[in-house]
């Protein structure tokens, strides 16, 4: 048994020595003869390509590619956005040919439209008379309907009161029996604060009408005549008065 163990141990050592010798020989060989790594060199195509003026397919493709990839900014003058080139023959339309492909669909017959301005008139002597008579009634009769129209009620103004925080409408009514200094004014907006005893101070003008006399008139009207503080609960409100 001891002899068998010695033989096995000897064989292991011999194998290790042979393996180490093989590895050392391979490393030495690579140092003397290094392995040349080959890299595939990719040749890029040249950026500049020349296109002839002929009608060949290759030249036409290159010209279209150059137009498509043209880096010129659009705000620079180019042949596409600058100059007065003549229109193509198919784009030119003579008078009366613009809507030649579409048949007319008349809603109102021509016999129902009065022929204004076709009657013979005497040629005036003065240029002023020509301007007066030449355009007397160019669209007379068009857009008129023989119906009775109701008359709008006359009102002096309109009052609207809304809550300042939630925008809820508290009062919305017409004002009658008042005579503001002017009738052509923009809507007036006030901010008011109401306490338990009524208005606190005067209404603050938020948006004027464009006329001081109109703003002062409605401020006094809300406080003295309309008595706004007696109609509202304590809080903050927006008051809009318009015609």
Image (tube, rainbow, N blue to C red):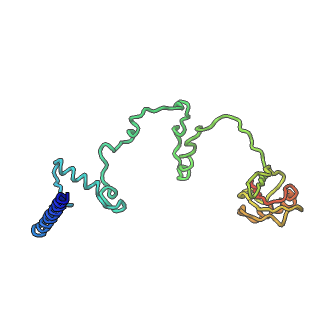
Camera-side residue: 236 or 222?
A: 236
Name the side, left or right, on which 154 lies relative to 66.
right
Numbered circles on residues, count: 0
Asked whether residue 44 appears in the rendered view, the answer is: no
Q: Position of residue 102 (x, y in %)?
A: 41, 34
Which residue shows up at 81% across the image and 56% down it? 179
Q: Position of residue 164 (x, y in %)?
A: 75, 58
- Name the residue at the right extreme: 197
Q: Position of residue 124 (x, y in %)?
A: 53, 48
Name the side, left or right, on which 15 lies relative to 203.
left
Res. 229 image quadrant: bottom right
Asked whether residue 97 appears in the rendered view, the answer is: yes
Q: Position of residue 123 (x, y in %)?
A: 51, 45
- Name the residue at the front extreme: 1
Camera-side residue: 78 or 127?
A: 78
Camera-side residue: 241 or 66?
A: 66
Q: Is residue 95 above or below residue 110?
A: below
Q: Is residue 209 above or below residue 139?
A: below
Which residue shows up at 57% across the image and 45% down it? 136
Camera-side residue: 80 or 16?
A: 16
Name the side, left or right, on which 87 lies relative to 196.
left
Res. 35 image quadrant: bottom left
- Check the picture and name the quadrant holding the N terminus: bottom left
């Amino acid at each position: 048994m001891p002899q068998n163990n010695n033989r096995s141990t000897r064989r292991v050592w011999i194998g290790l020595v042979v393996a180490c010798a093989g590895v050392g020989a391979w490393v030495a060989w690579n140092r003397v003869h290094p392995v040349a790594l080959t890299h595939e060199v990719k040749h890029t195509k040249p950026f500049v390509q020349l296109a002839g003026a002929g009608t060949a397919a290759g030249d036409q493709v290159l010209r279209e590619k150059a137009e498509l990839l043209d880096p010129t900014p659009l705000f620079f003058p180019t042949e596409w956005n600058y100059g007065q080139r003549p229109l193509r023959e198919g784009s030119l339309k003579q008078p009366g040919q613009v809507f030649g492909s579409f048949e007319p669909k008349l809603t109102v017959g021509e016999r129902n439209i009065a022929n204004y301005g076709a009657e013979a008139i005497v040629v005036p002597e003065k240029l002023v008379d020509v301007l007066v008579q030449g355009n007397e009634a160019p669209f007379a009769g068009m857009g008129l309907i023989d119906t009775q129209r109701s008359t709008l009620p006359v009102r002096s103004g309109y009052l609207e009161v809304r809550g300042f925080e939630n925008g809820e409408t508290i009062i919305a009514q017409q004002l009658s029996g008042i005579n503001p200094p002017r009738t052509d004014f923009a809507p007036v907006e006030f901010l008011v604060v109401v306490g338990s005893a009524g208005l606190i101070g005067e209404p603050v003008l938020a948006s004027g009408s464009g006329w001081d006399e109109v703003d002062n008139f409605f401020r006094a009207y809300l406080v003295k005549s309309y008595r706004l503080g007696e109609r509202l609960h304590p809080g903050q409100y927006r008051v809009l008065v318009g015609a």
